[in-house]
Amino acid sequence: MHKTIIISNRLPVQLQISNGSIEAIPSVGGLATGMKSVHTSGESLWIGWSGLTDEEIPEELSKEIDVVLKQHGAAKVNLSQEEVNGFYFGFSNRTIWPLFHYFLQYAEFELENWETYKKVNQKFADAILESAGEDDTIWIHDYQLMLVPKMVRDKRPKIAIGFFLHIPFPSYEIFRIMPWREEVLEGLLGSNLIGFHTYDYERHFLSSVRRLLGKEVSFNNIFDDNRVIKVDSFPMGIDYDKFHEAAKIHNQNTTEEHSDLQRRLDSHKESSPDAKLILSIDRLDYSKGIAKRLHAFKYFLDKYPEYKEKVRLIILAVPSRSNVPQYQLLKREIDELVGRINGELSTVSWTPIWYFYRSLPFENLIDLYTSSDIAWLTPIRDGMNLVAKEYIATRIDKSGVLILSEMAGSANEMNESLLINPNNFEQIADTLYKAINMPFEEQKSRNTQLQKRLARYNVEKWANDFMSSLQQQKNLEVGNISKRLTPTILKKILQDYKKAENRIFFLDYDGTLTGFKNDPQKASPDEELYELLDALKDIPGNEIYLISGRDKGTFTKWFLPKKYNMIVEHGVWHSTNGEEFKMLEKVKRDWMDNIRPVLESFVDRTPGSFVEEKNYSLAWHYRNTDPDFGAQRANELNTVLTSLIANDDISVLNGNKVMEVKSSNVNKGRAAMRILSQAHYDFIFAIGDDWTDEFMFNELPEEATTIKVGLQNTQAKFFIESVGGVREILRKFIP
């Protein structure tokens, strides 16, 4: 029976050693909660670091820890203190975290930390490989483990791997600053499915893949040799029922059952029944904008002084990475800022800010959520922000106002909240004023919609959607495998070839017999190709046709002395046995003078592009341009050309980084059929790589063997992964 293997930096349990024994306490964090349904349904294993370094684990307890973890469906990866320092506190938290949150000033690029990050990622990959079978499903989580997918894929090419990033993925301009950017992207592309919280993060990732790796991206699919990687957004939810039901129970409790914190909150409300409590909960992190929020609160009280003694801000800062220097400085800054504001504005009966620097148990969080009139969450950059969702889930009577930074991932789903720019103090002050004075009916209307959405798309739905999408992607690959040219299929093709007496081969050139070059004129044939074509042509019964969009001048220079049969310019010209080219079709040229200036104007506006003029067609090449910009210009040019040629007998072909304008009555399919009509062939073979070859695949008889180079949608019967495989296949036809 296949199993699901979950991998994260930390396990869903916390280990405690006391009196020579070990205890595992289940975690209550968002990921542990979110993965509960996946982890407990069917056979599963959770792999991660235990939280204890090798130095902290007594040798006699090591095996006992494994036994205890196994009872929780978990297995540990052992890390030394040095590895934790370089991998977690070093590269993960001093390089990736600040860079991905746009805090470039804090990003460090230490080679030693990078080497440790790679080493630890390999440890996680090895732990997976030790436990995983080919039919298992792997789900890897977060920025600490971005190299693991490829490390596993290299050893288990057919296994299903999903990866989810729980923090933002930055724009290309930010991401490319990282010295090891290509390795990180390649690591992630070992996955079948890569998930993000929002479409923006997905878009940034796809842009980086295009620009840095040059991979083909179509919508949200990345084509990587013989694989298709899907990239999608899955906004993470919360355990809605847990928070909603806890709030219900809390509201039913008697005064005697209230916690000390709740009694203090009750006392405040009784003494100032018209005053509003504003709640702010965050980990102590520079990405959360706590200092800015404090400055904005002071700005609000200065702009609206009538609310002094009428509002109180509760700041709960949860300790985080307290051994990292930036976090120590941040805590000092916030401590001083709270003290300064309270010192300046406090009265005998009123302290504007209640500040807590601690973690609170779940019951006290419910106290704060249910007692606060406004939740004010203004991160400068945040992958999701689940606190916003938790606050809304606890509003049983649908009262309360959520003020949320538009920079938080959750803002995309929570449009009914009051969205603000965390850097705009004027807007924040006015929004606080609006929140304080919002009528109950408006609060109820907004929160009703939010609660419906959060209850429907909860954390369990998030996890199940991801797993379902991963399975669909795996099934898609299985479907593609059925079209892959396997050794068994090739053996059958070779048998048909040997039985046949009259055989014909249609061979595309660029992207098939040879790879692409930035300058098309540099993609000239090598000696190995000449020898291969000569050997294939000299076999009795074989007829070879090079069929290309290339101009006849280039093919005359390269191939005419070899006396190969050739069809060029997509079927306009035809040469047999070394004879001069003759026209297969009568083609007009009068349209070219009208189209040429249009293409040249796009060259002027698109650095790196150029126009290639053939006898009866014009091609705009954009292989040397920025991938995103080139694709954008290609779409724009396609729109312009389509409108220009609507009433003419010409068409636009979209090839591999090239757009070609030519007469509609010529294409490779039509040309190939003209050749086939002149004789009888009992073996027909055609191979090509782009959309211009689809005409040929579509037109050839059903019995023809048609092969696409590359894994894309195609009319061909089979596909192979790369140019390198083409020559290998052709050699099989030579005795």
Image (spheres, rainbow, N blue to C red):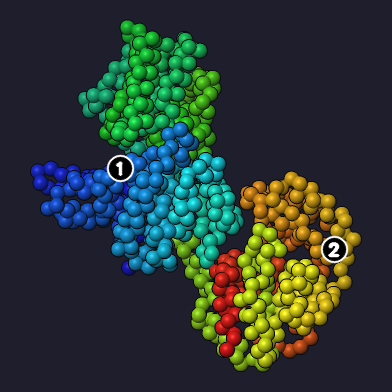
Task: Decide: is 506 above or below 136.
Answer: below
Residue at the disc numbered 2:
649
Query: Among all residues in the image, which is located at the extreme left?
Result: 19
Do the CB atoms of the residues marked 1 and 2 lie less than 8 Å apart? no
Q: Quadrant of the N terminus?
A: bottom left
Residue at the disc numbered 1:
85
Percent coordinates x, y for residue 194 in the rendering: 47, 53
Residue 552 found in image quarter: bottom right
Question: What amino acid type should be assigned to the residue bearing mark 1?
Answer: Asn
Residue positioned 27% across, 53% down in the render: 77
Can I make out residue 374 in this image?
no
Residue 4 found in image quarter: bottom left
Percent coordinates x, y for residue 450 in the rendering: 47, 36
Task: Decide: is 43 above or below 534.
Answer: above
Question: What amino acid type should be assigned to the residue bearing mark 2?
Answer: Asp
Name the foreground residue: 659 vs 402: 659
Residue positioned 47% across, 31% down in the render: 380
Marked residue nearer the N-terminal end (1 or 2)? 1
Residue positioned 88% across, 63% down in the render: 589
Query: Among all residues in the image, which is located at the extreme right?
Result: 590
Front position among marks 1 and 2? 1
